[in-house]
Amino acid sequence: MDYQLDPNWTLEPIGGDTGEAFLASNSNERVFMKRNSSPFLAVLSMEGIAPRLIWTKRTSNGDILTAQEWLPCQVLSDNEMRDNQVINLLHEYHHSEYLNNMLMKIGGVIYNPIDFVHDFDRDLHPHLKEHSFLSEVKHYLEETIIYIEQAPKTVCHGDLNRRNFLISDQNRLYLVDWEMVKIADPMSDIAQILVQYVPMESWGEWLERYGIELNASHYCRLEWYSLMSLLTLIKKDFKEERFVAVNEKILLLKHIFKNRYYQ
């Protein structure tokens, strides 16, 4: 990839799903650089949710390079994903009318529940297509969309795994990689956190800390997006040949589905 930078810059790849994130450095500066980040990044930077945006550059082929402040940071552990800092950060951007309005202004994608199902179906491996239990869960989700599709929508990150949460040496938490940002039911974000990092027996306590008192409507939405999140994670783990993780998520999927609201 030609990033068309001054030859004094050196690029060191940083692990990630896209393979297009780098530590860029020259004699005077170190920055986190990425290709074609979400245009929403500038707003998130101003709000302190993402590290400070330093500059942007359009290359001759139309790509946009963004450079953010490079901070001494660590990725959160699985256990740290249950901390109040994570809950408070989700609550902050989920409840920000300003962020919601700004994302709408720049053409943010509005996601309805059926769009998550379509994402799961897209490029699904034949083995998973033929899996009878996964197909049964997907059919249930399609049938029950009617009960959750009118839920309020707001800014959602869309890819909440621990590698996207960075804690600085000043104990400031940042959330990065907003390429999948969308306007959707915030329960879609919440479910991603719960199914990956929080034991089921602690879900009620986690939701209480977030500020949700479970009623029938909340429960149906949480169940729907938990099942949907697990299907999506199973698809990703299978593609990356993490078969132990696939089986673990299928077990959780079966537990939730066995106790589903609409029998």
Image: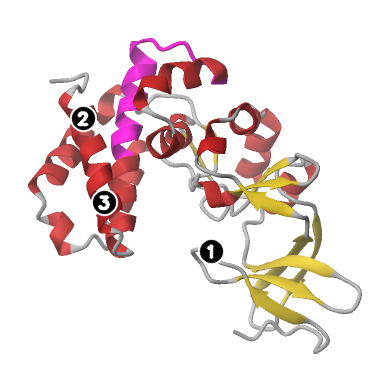
Tag 3's secondary structure?
Answer: helix
Tell me the amino acid under the disc marked 1.
Gly
User: Which is nearer the eye, 72 or 21?
Assistant: 72
User: Which is nearer the eye, 194 or 141?
Assistant: 194
User: Dot 1: few (<14), some (14–19), or many (≥20) neighbours within 10 Å?
Assistant: few
Residue 211: tell me if it is visible: no
User: Which is nearer the eye, 107 or 148?
Assistant: 148
User: Dot 2: few (<14), some (14–19), or many (≥20) neighbours within 10 Å?
Assistant: few
- Is tag 1's residue or tag 2's residue first in the polypeptide sequence? 1
Whole-angstrom CA distance, mark 1 to mark 2, is 31 Å
Quadrant location of the N terminus?
Answer: bottom right
Circle 3 is placed at which residue position? 246
Whether 48 is among the magenta residues is no
Quadrant location of the C terminus?
Answer: top left
Q: Residue at x 63, y 43 (%)?
A: 103
Circle 1 is placed at which residue position? 16
Whole-angstrom CA distance, mark 3 to mark 1, is 20 Å
Q: Residue furthest bottom?
A: 7
Circle 2 is placed at which residue position? 255
Disc 3, disc 2: CB below 8 Å?
Answer: no
Tell me the amino acid under the disc marked 3.
Val
Magenta part of the protein: which range?
210-228
Whether 219 is among the magenta residues is yes
Q: Is residue 209 above or below residue 17?
A: above
Mark nearer the viewer, 3 or 1: 3
- Is tag 3's residue or tag 2's residue first in the polypeptide sequence? 3
Tag 2's secondary structure?
Answer: helix
- Is tag 3's residue or tag 1's residue first in the polypeptide sequence? 1
Q: Residue at x 35, y 33 (%)?
A: 225
